[in-house]
Image: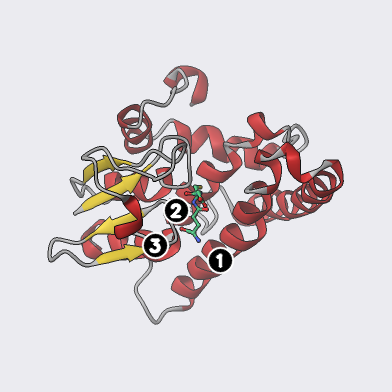
Amino acid sequence: MKLYYAPGTCSLAPHIVANEAKIALDLERVDLGKTPRLTGSGADYASINPNLYVPALRLDDGAILTEGVAIMQYLADYEPENKLVPPPGTLARVRLEQWLVFISTELHKMYSPWLFHPEYGAQAQDVARAKLAQRLAYVDAQLATNGPFLLGLDFSPADAYLFTIVGWSQFTKVDLSSFTYLRALMDRVAARPAVREAMLAQGLQVKDPVAAA
Ligand SMILES: N[C@@H](CCC(=O)N[C@@H](CS)C(=O)NCC(=O)O)C(=O)O
């Protein structure tokens, strides 16, 4: 399987999930900064995902899967013995889906594009930051009572996704200082070997493991 990714974007989350599930992925970088968007092998990314965004996953039979939430669940289910996700049909699995959708719609799409494009104006950014402050306070409160991970005691793809998206806070001036449990989750996820390997493979900076533990 091949993951199309761009460093520092949401495509880090399925990469982490693959590492946690011990799935060896081929990686192909997409240059999001140029038109047309080319991949590392020189392909026009429009022929892989006509919507032009990462991540996309090429399956071994050539089929293309898009949407990070779907890709993460596909990867986690691919190696069920690693128990990264609760079994389909259980309430726990629906809780996972609840978190994945929440992160996608209430966090991911609030940081991006609004906080990455100053040209959208201060008002749009103020609204996005205010919404994020409320949503992140909710996550923090959930972690305080049901943590240390989003599903409780066990790491899941929801934590990989949350880590990836909330990791944008420093670049987008989203203040996490009052979210003690969320910051603890960020450090806990950052210290996981599978996460560090994914970040290093994408050329991202990783924290000192002792400091992050
Ligand atoms: N709905 C997609 C959105 C993915 C997305 O927003 N990808 C961003 C990087 S985090 C991207 O590639 N943006 C470039 C673009 O939209 O043109 C998903 O959840 O996978």
The residue wearing badge 2 is 53
| Frontmost residue, 152 versus 73 | 73
Q: Residue furthest bottom?
A: 89
Q: Position of residue 5 (x, y in %)?
A: 36, 44
* Numbered mark located on residue 50 in the image: 3
Q: Position of residue 86 (x, y in %)?
A: 38, 68
**Cβ at disc 2 under 8 Å from ligand 1:** yes
Q: Amino acid at mark 1?
A: Val
| Picture quadrant of residue 51 | bottom left
Q: Which mark is residue 15?
A: none
| Residue at 60% from the left image edge and 52% from the top image edge | 108
What is the quadrant of the N terminus in the image? bottom left
Mark 3 vs mark 1: in front: 3
Q: Which residue is located at x 76 percent, y 45 percent? A: 120
Neighbor class of circle 2 (other Cα within 10 Å; few <14, some 14-19, many 20+) is: many
- Residue furthest to the front: 35
Q: Secondary structure at mark 1?
A: helix
- The image position of residue 18, as x and y in percent, is 28, 49
Residue 99 visible in the current orientation:
yes
Nearest the eye: 187 or 73: 73
Secondary structure beneath label 2: loop
Mark 2 vs mark 3, foreground winner is: 3
Give the quarter of the image for residue 173: top right
| Horizontal relation, residue 78 to residue 105: left or right | left
- The amino acid on which the numbered mark 2 sits, given as a three-letter code, is Tyr
Residue at image position (81%, 43%) is 121
Q: Which residue is mark 1?
A: 101
Label 1 within 8 A of ligand 1 by Cβ:
no
Q: CA distance from mark 1 to mark 2?
A: 18 Å
Q: Is residue 115 left or right of residue 153?
A: right
